[in-house]
Amino acid sequence: MTDWDQRYLTGDTPWEKGQPSPALLDLLDKRLDWGPGPLLVPGCGLGHDVRALGMLGIPVVGLDISPSAVALAREFPPTGDQTYEVGDFLDPAWRAGREFSAIWEHTCFCAIDLSQRASYAQAVAGCLPQGGLLAGVFYLTPYDPDEDDTGPPFGVTIAELDEWFTPAFERLDGWVPQAAFPGREGREWIGLYRRRDLLKEHTAIRDEDLRRKIREIDKRDGVEDGRLLAAPLTCPKCHATVTAGALACLTCGATIAPKYPYAP
């Protein structure tokens, strides 16, 4: 595996271009719905894409496994609500309890070992809610036919991307960007994927069924008002009125069996 922090310490960072991805800048002009945030940029490096996305006015988190890269990223003036963290995107412990409205992929997927791509697909699916956006510029052909292609970066086909992501995502769009760093022209592909609603896809539940069930549950307390309130109870021993949720009657001390407003 590549020692990414050592690469930053020695300055061996040919992927570092000193500016945001041209494909990302073009994508920002398209007024894509990134959601309310926060937005995640895994493998953010020095954070150029993070700061470009910061101009959207939503919180952005830049993540990198290299402490040196994160330290350098923090030295740049912010463009909005952005933070940088050291962490491993593929580590379930880092992802636990975190949710983002969108993920921007640029140099992470192509850099990880091929054996880790399944973990990457699980990571993006786990970090995004239903309707969440995965947007990325993916490296299709990093090398010329006569070059050593052992990577990283590692190339990928569009069919392979769909194979990795479509179990949890639907592809919204994809195209070869017109703008690219020198040497990458025609070698990259922008993919837009939306997190699927797996409940609807794997059951016969329709929106009208869900709305009808919600109204049915709402009416169980006797009032259709968007709230579910428990009615006062009557003590079975002294017949005094007892507040819903009480475990004992305050008048005689008798035990009260709990009753829940959502019970049939």
Image (tube, helix red, strand yellow):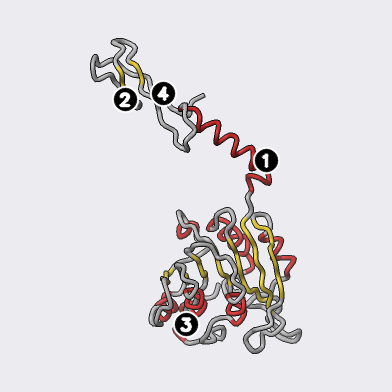
Tag 3: amino acid: Tyr
Q: Return the x and y of residue 55 as percentages of the image width and height.
A: 48, 75
Q: Position of residue 263 (x, y in %)?
A: 48, 26
**Which residue type carries mark 1?**
Thr
Decide which of 120, 178 is in the foreground and name it: 178
**What numbered label is drawn on residue 132?**
none
Q: Residues within 10 Å of mark 4 (few under 14, many from 20)?
A: some
153 and 81: which is toward the camera: 81
Mark 1 / mark 4, whichever is N-terminal? 1
The spot of residue 238 in percent (x, y) is 28, 10
Query: What is the three-letter code of the residue carrying label 4?
Result: Lys
Circle 2 residue: 243
Viewer-side label of 3, 2 = 2
Badge 2 marks a residue whose secondary structure is: loop
Mark found first going from the N terminus, 4 or 2: 2
Residue bearing mark 1: 203
Indicate which disc, 2 or 1, sits on the residue closer to the N terminus. 1
Instruction: Indicate the secondary structure of the residue bearing disc 1.
Output: loop
Q: Residue at x 60, y 64 (%)?
A: 134
> Distance of mark 1 from mark 3, alpha carbons?
49 Å
**Residue 54 x/y as whole percent:** 47, 74
For disc 4, the marked residue is 259
Residue 242 found in image quarter: top left
Q: Look at mark 3 in the image and give the residue it sits on.
A: 8
